[in-house]
Image (tube, rainbow, N blue to C red):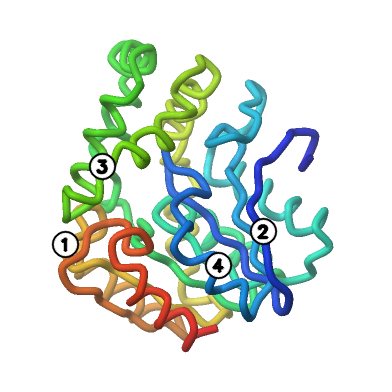
Amino acid sequence: MVAGARIHCLSGGQGEPVVLLHGLGASSYTWRHLLPSLARTHAVYAPDFPGYGRSDKPRDFDYSLGGFAAWLRTFLTERGLPAAALIGNSMGGAVALRLALDEPRLVRRLVLIGAPVFLNNVPQMVRIMRRPLLGRLLELFLGRWTVRLVAATAFLDPALITKDVIDEYSLAFRTRAGRRATAETLRRCLSPDLDGYIARYGTLQAPLLFIRGDHDGVVDDESARRFCGIVPNGRLLRIPRCGHVPQEEKPEAVRTALEAFL
């Protein structure tokens, strides 16, 4: 339980804590290739965010980036973790970045994997879901077809889009509460305070590694380079022949980079 909601969380290992944060529409399943190796040297936690995977999907949860960041702060507190390294893919990276800016004492190191950092990194699905009528209609029909569509843009190699991947990432869409959670996240991720957070990138204290697949269709190379040029301790790693989810598509390359960085 975290903040009154049942949370599904994979964990293992001992040592300095590392928290793995999945992207929008995904779950802790996205870390299946990395968690065992990281757990050899660290205490690793991979939660499903509220509304996703096998966690509860409360109707009254704040499914904005700020809401997820506040939840993450509570997660660290209730696990007795005074500080941790945060590794986040896509939306998970954006949540980790927000917490690092708001509560720098909680974040020892920060790894962003394909995380949107500027407004031009916003996927088209966000803009569609924010349209009042079209967004409400689309919410009703979120399902396996949505996962297939998004996966086709997230993975460079279509052979990696297996039945298991589709099954896992469509799990939340089997319920009305799960469909609503994803839709609300899409509707709320462009919060009015985003410009203020972007303006604070130069104050980021934690050492940062930004990992980008060279065929990432969400975060372009110019955005990644610009971001790493603004943050004081930022380093960019490009992974060749890779899309938006390097931890699934090129886990060996990501594992090597994480071992060196952590």
Q: CA distance from mark 1 to mark 3?
A: 13 Å
- Frontmost of labels 1 and 3 is 3
Q: Secondary structure at mark 4?
A: helix
The residue identified by callout 2 is 11
Q: Nearer the viewer, residue 208 or 245?
A: 245
- Regarding residue 108, the answer to whether it shows in the image is yes
Neighbour class for label 2 at 10 Å: few (<14), some, many (≥20)? some
Give how far across and how far down residue 16 sits, in percent.
70, 78
Give how far across and how far down residue 209 sits, in percent.
43, 78
Label at residue 151: 3
- Frontmost of labels 3 and 4 is 4
State if disc 2 and disc 3 touch (CB < 8 Å): no
Name the amino acid, label 2.
Ser
- Label 1 or label 3, whichever comes before in sequence order: 3
Q: CA distance from mark 2 to mark 4?
A: 9 Å
Give how far across and how far down residue 40 sits, in percent.
62, 77
**Placement of 251 over or under 154, stated as above or below:** below
